[in-house]
Image (cartoon, grey):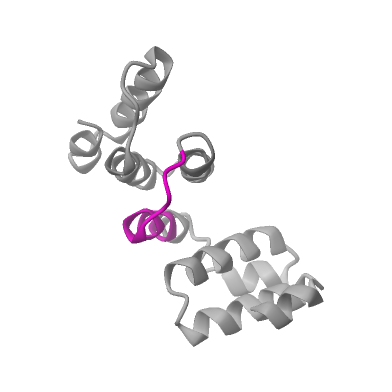
Amino acid sequence: MIGGLAVHGRAKEAVQLFVEMEREGKVKPNGITFVGLLSACCHAGLLEQGLDYFDRMKDMYGIEPRVEHYDCVVDLLGRSGKIGLLTARRSHGDVDTAVLAAERLVELEPDDVGNLVMLANVYAAATQWGNVTGA
């Protein structure tokens, strides 16, 4: 239901349905529920809320993220202008956003050398030298 609402342009209703589902506690969300929810956050421009749901998926519900969840997070960051501005953010001192985006990209595509180099550069800009060698 959440996914259906999300893909039919009713993202805010999808998020509201999830809120009600959580409040009532009768139905436990699964990985598919979160794909729909994250997609809804993407289409509604709810960056912080989407990232919060991604974290809650892992922390509260014990659902390990899969590629489709990371795809939604990267899409969410991209639609919010965070990935396109990653280098600019890092250059202007917004390293927290840059670190978050770069780490999520590496989680999504760990074998992509470009993502690893970008992550190392972000850590270097944040003077997190211990992390640079591990990136």
Q: Magenta residues: mostly which secondary structure?
A: helix
On the picture, is 107 further left or further right than 133? Answer: left
The percent coordinates of residue 126 (x first, y second) are 77, 70
Residue located at (39% from left, 42% from top): 41
Residue 83 position within the rendered picture, expressed as x and y whole percent measured from the top left = 50, 66
Q: Which image quadrant is residue 116 in?
A: bottom right
* Residue 88 higher or lower than 20, as above or below: below
Q: In this rendering, would 94 be left or right of 116?
A: right
Residue 135: percent from the left, percent from the top?
Answer: 64, 78
In the depicted view, which residue is nearer to us: 105 or 77?
105
Whether 63 is among the magenta residues is yes
Q: Residue furthest top?
A: 24
Q: Quadrant of the N terminus?
A: top left
Between 51 and 29, which is closer to the camera in this rendering? 29
Give, as a single range, the part of the protein colored magenta.
62-75
Q: Is residue 108 above or below residue 54?
A: below
Q: Is residue 91 left or right of residue 41?
A: right
Residue 119, quarter of picture: bottom right
- Residue 65 is covered by the magenta coloring: yes
Residue 89 location (% of width, % of height): 65, 66
Residue drawn at 31 percent across, 22 percent down: 27
- 93, above or below 25, in the image: below
Q: Is residue 75 left or right of residue 58?
A: left
Q: In the current view of this chain or complex, which residue is farthest to the front?
A: 62
Q: How many marks?
A: 0
